[in-house]
Amino acid sequence: MKTTISILAIIVLATLLTPSSGWADDDYYYTLDSAISISISDQYIAIQFDSNTTIPLLSQFQETYDCLSEDSVEYIDRFFWAFPLATGCGYTAAAVQIADDSVVARAFPTYRTPSDSVGFRVTDKVIVQFEDNIPSDSALAVLAAEGVRFVDSSAYRHNLWYCALAESITSGPIQYGNRLHERSETRWAYTAQYVAPVLFGTPSDNYFANQYYLNNTGQNGGTVGADIAAVQAWDIPLSDSTFRVAVMDDGLTEHTD
């Protein structure tokens, strides 16, 4: 069951999400049952290349369109790249420019929250946790009704499904996760989000000094420098987008910790 909230909270949330508020389908996303306000970023456009065509050199693709700047391109996910937008060219104008390119499958906006200076990207991936009592055929019908297709299911949690937007959907990716989340058959759902890595320098974590394996200063009688030189590594710029680092941390698996 979704989290129970008061009648007053329901009224407030309903007021926020009505058309008179100025919110469109892509102006919010859910974290638990709270709607987080977002806006479309004017810095990047997420482009999915057609998997049936030869992906062009990214630099050549950038040079083809004046709506794209020459700044570094960010890899998001398979066939998805975030291209920086030229000054004065927003997502809508860029999407129109590249709409007829045969190598482009679709273009999605990128987003930011009011306090977010980094922004985040989305692709065609949607994750859905259905209620335990929902049979598979009913769940599949829900997905089909919302323009989403089944891809895989979790081996660790019942009715947790990994999905993707139908190929016919060419815009508005956030709203599909929102609509699934709002259905009574689901516990939660969201369109998967990707945040570009940012170097923050030495963390302000109070326990960082205890992590001798990251930066050994001789604490607790250790050997100075006997560490993985993490602090020095954090000062190295991200200059090559062909290298990828994955942090394997499945937050969806129940565990006593």
Image: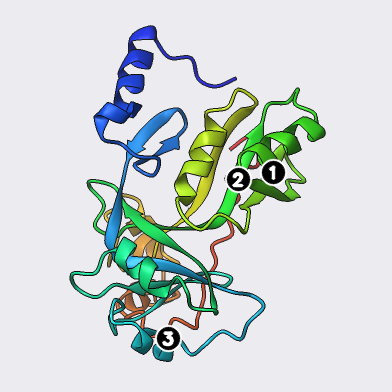
Q: Determine contact: label 1, label 2, CB under 8 Å.
A: yes
Kind of residue indicated by mark 3: Phe
- Can see residue 216? no
Residue sitting at 74 percent across and 42 percent down? 156
Characterize the local packing of mark 1: few (<14), some (14-19) or many (20 or more) Cα atoms within 10 angstroms: some
Relative to residue 200, is residue 48 drawn left or right? right
Disc 2 residue type (three-letter): Ile
The tag earlier along the polypeptide, 1 or 2, is: 2
Residue 154 placement (x, y as % from top left): 73, 46
Residue 86 vs 108, above or below: the answer is: below
Relative depth, front residue between 133 and 168: 168
Residue tagged 2: 127
Choose the circle earlier in sequence order: 2 or 3: 3
Residue 197 in the figure: left or right of residue 116? right
The answer to which quarter of the image holds residue 167 is: bottom right
Secondary structure type for disc 2: strand
Residue 129: give x, y in percent of width and height. Answer: 64, 35
* Extreme residue toward the top, this view: 7
Looking at the image, which is closer to me, 30 or 140? 140
Q: Which residue is mark 1?
A: 161
**Quadrant of the frame with the N terminus:** top right
